[in-house]
Structures are given as structure tokens and as C-alpha cells.
Amino acid sequence: MLRIERVAVAVEGRIVVKRASLELRRGEVNLLLGPNGSGKSSLLNAVMGHPKYVVVAGKVLLDGNDITHLNPEARVRLGLALAVQHPPRIRGVRVGKLLEKLVLRRVKSVQEAMKEVQNIAKLLNISHLLDRDLGVGFSGGEMKRIELASLMALRPRIALIDEPDSGVDVDSVLLIAEAIEEMMSMGTQSILIVTHTGLIAKHVKHHRAYVMVDGEIVAEGSSERILPMVLEHGFSAVVSCAVKRDE
Amino acid sequence: MSRDTIYEELKRRALEALSKPAPYGVDIDVEQLVNYTPKRRVTILSERERVKQVGIDVSSKTRSAYFYQVDSRIEAYGSLVSGVEILPLEQAIEERWDEVRKYFWRLIPVDMDKYTAVTFLKSSGGCYIRVKKNTRVDLPIQTCFLLSGGTQFVHNIVVVEEGAEATIVTGCTIAPEEMGLHIGITEIYLERKAKLVDVMIHSWNRVTHVRPRTAVVLDDDAVYASYYINMSVTKSLQSLPKVYARGVNSRVYSATIILGLGESVHDIGSIAELSGEHSRAELVSKVVARDRSKITTRLRISSLAPKTSGYVECRGLLLSETSSITTIPELEASHSDAELFHEASIGKLRDDEIEYLMIKGFSYEEAISMLIRGFVDIELKYLPPQVEKALQSVLDVLAKKSV
């Protein structure tokens, strides 16, 4: 579905992803692992068309079509969506209103959208946050759950989820995992989860894993094989072992 | 004093003040505008859509009373509920002088500046609204002042009697590209336990000057909530309403929202003078400056009695390098137990907020509009539901226009 081919990404003229290739297939949940600062978030932002993350080499293909230079709005329309790692605090933009606007991108009735927002909020335990300004005074777990809610509101074909398990409590991780499963049952066809702790992987069924170190994908393969290796020996061990690409 | 004597005295003072400039705002040559003749005369019905933009739906059934004036001509007025009286001020002066005299130029000095003076001398309309004791009106009172072009000098008096509650929605606008000067004098009297929500929405054009002059007095336990929105290009606007919270435990809330476009020059704010014990004021301004507009906001609370409290919030958002905003929050206290706070900020839209919304699928313009809508979000708790909905829509339009 989504192919990232030898992509390099620059932010303000500085290369932050040197060379990354990966593929998201229908029906799969894939993991992107890597230490802090390895370029995982930059890659996801570039795939979404974030104006600051410029693809300076390589291609992003969606269903075989080159979307490397499309704006984010067009990418969302094609079925891509991203839950960011650190959403900003935005005064005056209410969580409920934002989610409603996202749902309204695919449904016409405001009432239907409001109802769907209520359901999403219930699932992610954020009903009490709907009338509050986005991110203002929220805990880490609440922020992550709201990001997941924004994905559920968009119902993308392909979801990119950046660090859903960092800085959050176990209860939030469980809710997020439940939401990810729910998304797959509601029509999301492929998910890429960035994680450096692997915590979320304990609660979500996953298929393949990629390891990114210093701006490059250095290993890929079955997540059942790669994840324990990373969690046991660390990313440097994976690099030194030079895991062969098994597929 | 007889009516003639009062008029003579007011006239003498007005004549003396005819050249007196206002302390703030661009000084205007009123005579030049008095002689201006618009290309065509409009009516409320011919401008039905235009007045709708300023919150006046003339076909609406959801109103308790209405007063529609075009230029100096009063097109329609009437009350649909008992307990609310609405009539032209001139008629009220003729028919009920003994009642009206208690309110007539009592809160606003006729010689405050050339604009109050000329309004007295050339007065062209305005209404007298009286909400009777313990009357609680859910539906708003609509007042609309439309200008074909030229001048409009309006004088309104509003009295909300003891225990009464009402909401007034006033929309003021002008035909496009017509030079104009709108002056609205409004004197508001809230008796004990009275509550008034005063919503005013303005939409002018690039060659219109606007000089509202408003003063409000509150008795014990009275509540006054004001929402002022100006959402279009205006040649110049200067206004500094003054609220006298004289009653014990009286409450004042004022929100001013300005969108500065084109070459507009706005100098606007409000003053709350708390002389009633335990009285409280909250004054908020949210201004957005685009193009080459200039906006000055002045918010001032004076605590003149024990146990008074107040909060001033001035927020400015600059959308261009060539616009400017000045915010002047002022606090004054003459009692040691007064509690006064202020917050002020001027800034621009943050890139990370715009980008965040963009990667959620909104276009750049939609993202900007959402952020501006968020910026101008205000406390609407005083508004009845149907007015709240209308005001939300107006703010939505304002946010879209700002992009």
C-alpha cells in the first residue's frame, strides 16, 4: 500500500533521515524501532507532507502513485493520517470541535459527527476533555489518547502512530492498544507504530519491524524476531549484528 | 427645571464642544461628512443579507422586540412581549418627558467631545427601551442601524427595571463604498437585580468612521455583560464605553473582539468603575490585525470601594508585518483589599500550531481560520442559547474573513 523508497529527509537544510526504505502492507501492523533522535518521527512527518520535513531524495508511493510532493491535505484525503508524538497546546481550539471537524471530512451530518465523536471519546476515555482547549493542562496519557482519537475520527486507510507509549501510564497504553485494534476493525488497512520502548507491542498484534539508527533503516524483518533482540540487547547490538533483511 | 431649560442648557454646552476633539482616535471633520449625499438610499429589506451578517435576521421569529433604523428614518419598531417597551426616543421625549428626563444625557456628558455634541444638535433617531420590573425576556431585543452613507447620529436609552432580565442584539452596518459617520450614544440604566446582555456587532466599510459613546450604570446586584464585535474594514473606530458599577455586588463583563483589515484604525476599549462594595468586573479584548491596520485597546478597572475585584485581559494577534497593535491594560485601586489582575499579550500565529492542523488534513487557510477562531473564543456564559449560537456563527465568519 505505502512504499517509502530510499527516502532522505532534511529539516531546515540539515539531513535528518539519510536513507529509509520500508513498506506497509494491507492487513499489517508494523513497528518502527529506533533510539531517540534516530529520525523515526522525521520520517513519519515527511511521509505526511509536513512543510518542515522535506524529502530531498527518494520517493513516497501510495498504491503505486508518487505522493512525494503532495500537500498534507491531499495525503489525508488519500487515506494517510498521523498521530504525532508531541502535539502543540492550542488555546481556543476545543478537543471536541477539532474531532468533529475531522469526522466531518467524511460524513455530512453534524449530528452524526457529534455522535461519532462521543463514541470515540468514550472508547479512549477522553469525554471529560472534549470541551477543553487542545493540550492545555493535559497529562501525557491524555495527549496520546487524543491523538489516537484524531486518527479514529479520520478513519484513515493507513495510520502512522508516533510513540503512543512514551511517557504514558499503563492504563493509557491499554486504551490506545484497544483503539488501534478498533481502527483495524473499522477499515484501517495498515498501521505503522513508532516505539522505542516496545511497550505498545505487548498489547497489539504486530507483524513486521524496522529498526532505524542514525537516519537509516538498518534492519527489518519479522517483529517477533527483531523486537525481543532490541529489547534484550539494545539498538547498538542490532546494528553490530547487522541483521540481514529476511524478506 | 423645565424641558426647555434643560434643552437650552444642553444646547449651550454642545455648541461649546462642537470643535472639541476626543482624547483618543483620529479627529474627524464632521461637517464634511454631514454634507455627503449617498448614491442611493437603502432599506432594511434591500439589505436583508447585509444586516443578517451583523446578527439581525428580520424574518426571525425569535425576538421579543425590534427597532430598525436606516439613516435618520425609523423603518419599523415594536414589542412582541408584554413587559418590554420600545419606541423612538424622540417619541418617548414627547410623550413621557417626566420619565425620560431622568435618563436623558445623564450618563454621558453632552460636551464630552464633538461627537456627543453633534449628536445632540443634529440628533437623527435612536430608541428608548424599557424592560419592566421582574420581566425576564428569553428572546433578544433586536435593534439595527443601517446607513446608506453620510451621517447617522443616534441616541438610545435603555432602562432595565428591578429584577428584569433582557438581551439586546444590535447590528450596525453601511452600504458598500459609501462614505459615512455613525455616532451612537447609548445610556443604559440597570436597576437593582437587573441583568442586561448587550451584544453589538458592527460591519462597516473602508470609508466609514464610527464613534459609539456608551455609558452604563448598575445598581445593587445588577449584571451587565457586553459583547462587541467589529469584523470588517473600517476607516476609523474609536470607542471607550464606561460602566459604573455603583451597586453593591454588581457584576460587569465586557468582551471586545476586533478584526483589523485594510487600513483600518481602531482605538477601542472599556472602563469599569467599581464604586459598589463587592462589585466585580472582567474586561477582555481579543484583537486581530491584518494588512496595514492599527489597533489600540484600552481596558481599565478602577476599584473605588472595599472588596471590589477585577480582571483585565488584552490579547492581540498580528497577522502581517505592516499591522500594529497596542494594548493598554490599566488597574487602579484605592482600597487595600481590592483584588485586581491583568494579563496582556501580543503575538503571531505559531508555525507548529498551523503545521499540526495541516497534517491533520486541513488546508493552510483552514488551519489559520481555526486558530483565529480559537483565539477570539470568549466566555459566552451570559448569553441565552439562541444568541450564543448566532454569536458563534458571527465569530466563525470573522475567523474566515481574517484569512
Image (cartoon, coloured by chain):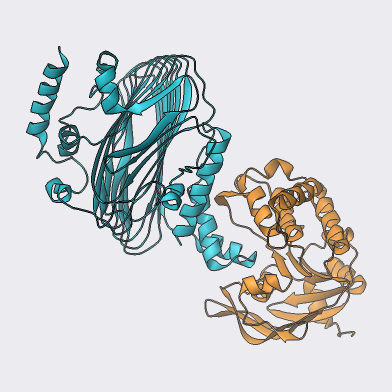
In this view of the protein, can residue B329 be seen by the observer? Answer: no
* Quarter of the figure with the C terminus of chain A: bottom right
Chain A rendering hue: orange
Chain B rendering hue: cyan
Q: Answer with the quarter of the image where residue A166 lies.
A: bottom right
Residue at the spot x=88%, y=58% of the render? A203
Q: Where is residue B167 in the image (x, y as percent from the top left)?
A: 47, 30
Q: Which of B107 and B72 is in front in this view?
A: B72
Residue at the spot x=67%, y=74% of the render? A75
Q: Is residue A137 left or right of residue A185?
A: left
Q: Nearer the viewer, residue B48 or A63?
A: B48
* Quarter of the figure with the N terminus of chain A: bottom right
Q: Where is residue A210 in the image (x, y as percent from the top left)?
A: 81, 76
Q: How many marks?
A: 0
Q: In this view, does B83 lie above or below B376?
A: above
Q: Nearer the viewer, residue B183 or A92?
A: B183
Residue at the spot x=31%, y=20% of the render? B304
Residue at the spot x=82%, y=56% of the render? A179
Q: In this view, does B369 lie to the left or right of B43?
A: right
Q: In this view, does A6 lie above or below B25?
A: below
Q: Is residue B127 left or right of residue A151?
A: left
Q: In this view, does A32 lie to the left or right of B166?
A: right
Q: Answer with the quarter of the image where residue A35 lies.
A: bottom right
Q: Is residue A228 above or below residue B47?
A: below
Q: Where is residue B336 in the image (x, y as percent from the top left)?
A: 35, 19
Q: Is residue B252 above or below residue B207?
A: above
Q: Where is residue A168 in the image (x, y as percent from the top left)?
A: 75, 51
Q: Nearer the viewer, residue B168 or B108?
A: B168
In this view of the protein, can residue B140 be seen by the observer? Answer: yes
